Amino acid sequence: MILDILDNADFYVPLNPHLATAFAFLRRPDLAQLETGRHEVDDDVYAVVARGKGRKVEDALIETHDHYLDLQYVISGTDTMGWKARRDLGPTTEAYDPRSDVAFYKDAPTAWAEVAPGAFAIFFPEDAHLPMISDGELHKVIMKVRV
């Protein structure tokens, strides 16, 4: 997991050949005005704009992805994101779905990070994560970047 601000994004571009595309999308001047939902960027990157009330920890499951990393950028609100090493997870709550590239687990995170507006978190396939935890409204963009 990486936690940083968008101003420092270029430090992370060498980690994945598609991160430059994802960070360029997040620097769009109209980012905050994009409609909620999926936005295609290219064959290896897409964005999901999310707006709405945050979830409570007890109403959410920690998740992993095999083929995409999650780059979660907060526009407004504070998203408290949980993390746990994937190797330490118990069994999935249901079988991995290759179409949506997600598996869910009942495990509790071992670490938490408050991600404020202008900051991002990157979760690799080795990272289980539990995002969208907030008492308030959240507006964020989740970049799905092929690994």
Image: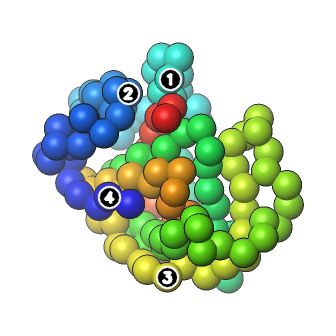
Crowding around mark 2 (Cα neighbors within 10 Å: few <14, some 14 to 19, many 20+) is some
Q: Earlier in the sequence, mark 4 or mark 3?
A: 4
Residue at far front of view: 87
Q: Earlier in the sequence, mark 1 or mark 4?
A: 4
Q: Quadrant of residue 34?
A: top left
Q: Earlier in the sequence, mark 1 or mark 3?
A: 1
Q: Looking at this view, is 37 or 93 the one in front?
A: 93
Q: Name the residue carrying label 3.
A: 110
Residue 44 disc label: 1
Tell me the amino acid under the disc marked 4.
Ile
Crowding around mark 3 (Cα neighbors within 10 Å: few <14, some 14 to 19, many 20+) is few
Tell me the amino acid under the disc marked 2.
His
Residue 21 disc label: none
Crowding around mark 4 (Cα neighbors within 10 Å: few <14, some 14 to 19, many 20+) is few
- Residue contact at pointers 2 and 1, CB within 8 angstroms: yes
Tell me the amino acid under the disc marked 1.
Asp
Q: Residue at x 79, y 45 (%)?
A: 97
Tell me the amino acid under the disc marked 3.
Thr
Q: Position of residue 75 (x, y in %)?
A: 34, 51
In this picture, residue 73 sits left or right of residue 50: left
Q: Position of residue 115 (x, y in %)?
A: 34, 66
Q: Earlier in the sequence, mark 2 or mark 4?
A: 4
Crowding around mark 1 (Cα neighbors within 10 Å: few <14, some 14 to 19, many 20+) is some
Tell me how far mark 1 sits from mark 3, CA to CA. 30 Å
Residue at far top of view: 43
Q: Position of residue 125 (x, y in %)?
A: 53, 51
Tell me how far mark 2 sits from mark 1, CA to CA. 7 Å
